[in-house]
Each structure stands twice: as C-alpha cells, then as structure tokens.
Amino acid sequence: MNATLILVPPAKQPTSRAAPTRRTSTAPAAAVAPAERESKPASKAQPKTPKPPKPPKILSPEESLEKAMHARTPATRARHAKIGLANHARLDPTTNAMLLRQLYLAYFETRRFAEAREIAVQAIRLDVLVDVLHHDSARAALAAGDLEAALAHLRSAARRGPPSRRPQHLWTLGSTLFLAQRYDEAISALARATRWATHEKPLYRAHLALARIAAGEGAASAELQETLDALAQAPCGQGYGRFVLGHLAYAAREWTAARRYLDAFVKRTESARPATAIALDGELRMARATLAKMAKN
C-alpha cells in the first residue's frame, strides 16, 4: 500500500508588532537659540515703591508748652512757644498766657528786653496770672533801664496778686528801691513784706534791717546779730540770702563772714541761668563793689 505523503505546512508563527520602544533621554533640553534669547529681554526686579512719609505730628498747645518749659536753649524755647501760639483755634487763656511767658523768657535771656516787655504786656491783657506777668514786665523794664516803669509794674503785681504771693512782690519792690538808694520807700515796702511773710520772713526782716542801716537809722548790735543768726539758719538764707547776709556782716564789721557770704552769692549767681543773672545784675554789681572795698583794706 503506497503510502501517501501528506505534506503538512509548517505552522505559522504569530507575528506581533512590537510597540516602538520609547527612548528616554536624560540629556538637557535643547538650549534656546541665541537669536531667540536676545529677543526675550531678561526680566528685572521691579523697584519697591517707597512708602509716603508720615505727616509730622501736630502738637497740641499743651504739648508745645511742655516742650518750651523744658527747652535747654532760648532759641528752642522760643520755637516751641511760637508753634503753640500759632494754634489759635485750640488755645485757652491760661495756656495762651503761659506760652507767651515762655516766649518772654526766651527774649529776656537773650537780652531782647523791649520785645520781652512787649510780650509780657500782651499777656497781661489775657487777665491770667496778672501779678506774675506784671512782675515779668518789671524785670524787663528794669533791665532796659526804665526804673519808673518797673516800679509801676511791681506795685500793680503787689496790688493784684493773691495773698500768698503779695509778700514776694512787696519784697521785690523794696529791694529794687533799695538798689536805687530810695531808702525811705524801700523801708515802707519791706516792712509790709515782712508783715505778710511766712517762710521767707527771716530774709525780708534782714533786708529791712539792711535798708534801715543804709538810711542811717542804725541798729543795736544785739538786734543785728539776732537778725543775722536767724537768716543764716533759715533755708531762705541760701541764694539771695547770701547777698543780704554779706552786707549785714559788712555793716557789723565782720569782714571774714562778709567776704564769705558775698563770694558765695557772686559765684552762685554767675553760674545760674541767664535770666537769673540778668535779673540780679544790680545785686551783683553791689556785691562786687563791696568785695572790692574789703580787698583794699
């Protein structure tokens, strides 16, 4: 039996198309072309817009007064006083008067006596602290050489001041008359000051004794020594009291004590604020003259 050869075709292998392999590359992205780089200007940081400055604080008149009162120079005192006075809408009479007084002090300390007196008179019209402002006007008038105007202001201060300040105004009136060698008038004013005085009585009493000695009335040595001792032991014997003590010791011929007291008065007054030294110019001149007399003997 012939065998029939049956040819079996070979089985077809399945053909599968492999998916294209994705090539991953770690290479950096292509650089931008020079032309493209030039066409895109580099971004610059935008400058910060500066904040607008804060508006200056507008001081109240009371704040300006506080600054003027604590100023270290007359120019600063005057500047703050003028700022406060420029605020018309918010000024009450008391603050107004006190600001004017600070401006007065600034002018007085710089020896602008006419302007100082004008400011003090302007402040008097506000009818606040009238006696104090009359006293200020007197100092400016006296520094400018107008004795009669100064005396008129001091009499007004004594007349219009409260009882607590009346003795001081009378004493200032008496001391001014004493320096002017109008001893009878000085004795009258100083006697009234002594009558009204409390804590300052030893000073006023000693000044009254000095005026009486200058007028030729004389004083018993025991009474004079008692007056000297009372003032030397009192707090009011410091400062201006040294001027009175020095001249009472001179009258008592106690040269060493007189020199010590007057030296202390001169040194203290010369180192004081300008306003104090100006106000005590007459006393300074008299103390120096008395020291010069003692130096010759």
Image (cartoon, rainbow, N blue to C red):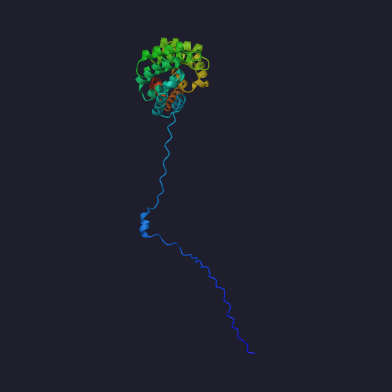
Residue projecting furthest to the right: 1
Q: Nearer the viewer, residue 165 or 174?
A: 165
The quarter in which the N terminus is drawn is: bottom right
Q: Is 55 located above or below residue 143 in the figure? A: below
Q: Nearer the viewer, residue 273 or 231?
A: 273
Displayed quadrant of residue 106: top left
Q: Whole-percent x and y of residue 84?
A: 42, 24
- Count of numbered labels shown in the rendering: 0
Q: Nearer the viewer, residue 258 or 138?
A: 138
Q: Is 53 located above or below residue 267 in the figure? A: below
Displayed quadrant of residue 170: top left
Q: Nearer the viewer, residue 12 or 58?
A: 12
Residue projecting furthest to the bottom: 1
Q: Whole-percent x and y of residue 236?
A: 50, 20
Q: Is 267 located above or below residue 141 in the figure? A: below
Q: Residue at x 49, y 21 (%)?
A: 237
- State whether residue 98 appears in this view: no
- State whether residue 230 appears in this view: yes
Q: Whole-percent x and y of residue 93?
A: 45, 18
The quarter in which the C terminus is drawn is: top left
